[in-house]
Amino acid sequence: MRHHAVPVLVVLAVVVVLWYAGALLLNFDVARNLADENATTWDIAAATMSQGRPVLPAPHQVATELFESVFMHPVNSPKSLVYHAAVTAFAAGVGFVFAFVLGIALAIGIVHVRTLERSLMLWIITSQTVPVLAIAPMVVVVLGNVGLTGLLPKALIAGYLSFFPISTGMVKGLRSPDPMQRDLMRTYSASGAQVFRKLRWPAAMAFLFPSLKVAATLALVGAIVAELPTGAQAGLGARLLTGSYYGQTQQIWAALIMASLLALLAVGVIDGARLAMLRARGGRL
Amino acid sequence: MAADAALMTAAAPAADVQPAAVVARDLSIVFEADGQRTVALQNVSIAIGRGAFVSLIGPSGCGKTTLLRAIADLERPTSGTLVVNGGSAERARLDRAYGYVFQAPALYPWRTVARNVMLPLEIMGMPPAERRSRAGRYLDLVGLKDFHRRFPWQLSGGMQQRVSIARALSFEPALLLMDEPFGALDEITRDGLNLHLHGLWRSAGMTVVFVTHSIPEAVFLSSRIVVMSPRPGRVIEEIEVDLPAERDLDLRETPAFLKVAHRVREALRAGHSYD
């Protein structure tokens, strides 16, 4: 971890410098129009750093917005970013659980039933060629018409987006035992359930965790996208939408940063589970 | 004719009293893939008496592994009959009548050494206390007393193969099928394991069918050697190994040993001149 710190910090510093430069350039025209006649170029440049509705807010503006929206409001208030993050995270979490169950069930079916492989695999792949931005509004509107709003449509879209890496990863993982390892089970005349429990499932674990990490971030994307089309009242997607309506770019950026923090948290939790399993297996998965 | 004669003498002492462990008669196995016919075994007839140590020797691709896999019901014969443990090969497999040692250790990397040995015992529904004591006993037997909690990848290749032997012995099958178990190991390790295996066979009294392409290994371990020809695999000759039952590695320098080894080599050469 320690020898990663320096390169990571260098990249961060470069990003911050470029970001300030970008804010200066992109906000300059507006700042000049707003400045009075005898303002110097230096005055205008300074003004680009503190506009109310900048094209690109400066990093410190985003940091201030993030700090205020996280710490200056009670967490159950719609003004709190924590509240919105929790709404989105819950929808993404429920969607992720859908995806986990569906993805693994599909993988088990595909690995064990030949007809399922032929019939399902094509549809699973096709499902991923449909852009989620096109599907999301339809699902939200259709479900809204039958009275289902809020959590469920968001979770469905999050699950729709994230089951794919889980099922493909698990199909690969459940098929990963080599012929010798399978023959061994046959010499014990092990039942199908025993082969699954003692060979296929444990062998698939090495494939499960990378899939879960991808799926977790996709679930988050799905939940946010599902909040966009109907102008949801709560959630990070709603924050992005209202931010862009009212030119509150700081709010958009703060929501984006919160979304990536959520993704980091999710990936961290999954990695924790992976490390626990790694330890139980003596250091190899 | 020579094969028939050897078959008779081999069957003479033990097999008269009890049914043989393995009897194959006119066994043929043909693989068909993409319209290509490959004759792996052609009219193979052998009888392996209970308690014998029989090596199948021959060049690569002579079908010796296929024959072993057929005995284990991992391949289905195309024609001929095969009796294992007094019944069909499938019956023997379902009864878990044999232990199989593969060319590679085929250990499950997520299980500790002890839990690898316990795998067949779990599948056969043995109570946990019995599983643990069996794993302990058979790991001791192969000289891995202090490695129970290790994982397979922490062991050398020779040690891993010993774990796989312990695993095959753990449920105490009457028949042990070994497919070039030491083929991937260095000479020194191999010598040690040969000595070890010989001791195990002498004390446990099970039947062993052992596939190898090493002449010294076959002569050292076996009570009888079945020499096979290149594809299509046939039995060329069966050679009784008239060496003392109690064997050590020095035996391999003796004239008696070299004489048997020479006969095996001649038989292998005869097989090659067929085509």
Image: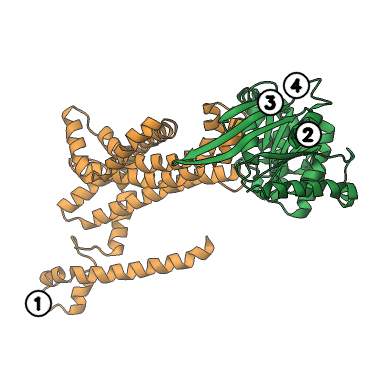
As measured in the structure, the alpha-carbon distance from the residue carrying label 4 to the one carrying label 2 is: 18 Å
As measured in the structure, the alpha-carbon distance from the residue carrying label 1 to the one carrying label 4 is: 113 Å
> Mark 2, residues whose alpha carbon is within 10 Å: few (<14), some, or many (≥20)?
some
Relative to the observer, which residue lies in front, B212 or A160?
B212
Per the image, the residue denoted by label 4 is B19
Badges 4 and 3, same chain = yes
As measured in the structure, the alpha-carbon distance from the residue carrying label 1 to the one carrying label 2 is: 115 Å
Per the image, the residue denoted by label 2 is B6
> Mark 4, residues whose alpha carbon is within 10 Å: few (<14), some, or many (≥20)?
some
Per the image, the residue denoted by label 1 is A37
Q: How many marks?
A: 4
Tint applied to chain A in the drawing? orange
Per the image, the residue denoted by label 3 is B97
As measured in the structure, the alpha-carbon distance from the residue carrying label 3 to the one carrying label 1 is: 99 Å
Name the element at disc 3.
Answer: loop
Q: Is residue A19 left or right of residue B42?
A: left
As measured in the structure, the alpha-carbon distance from the residue carrying label 3 to the one carrying label 2 is: 26 Å
Q: Earlier in the sequence, mark 4 or mark 2?
A: 2
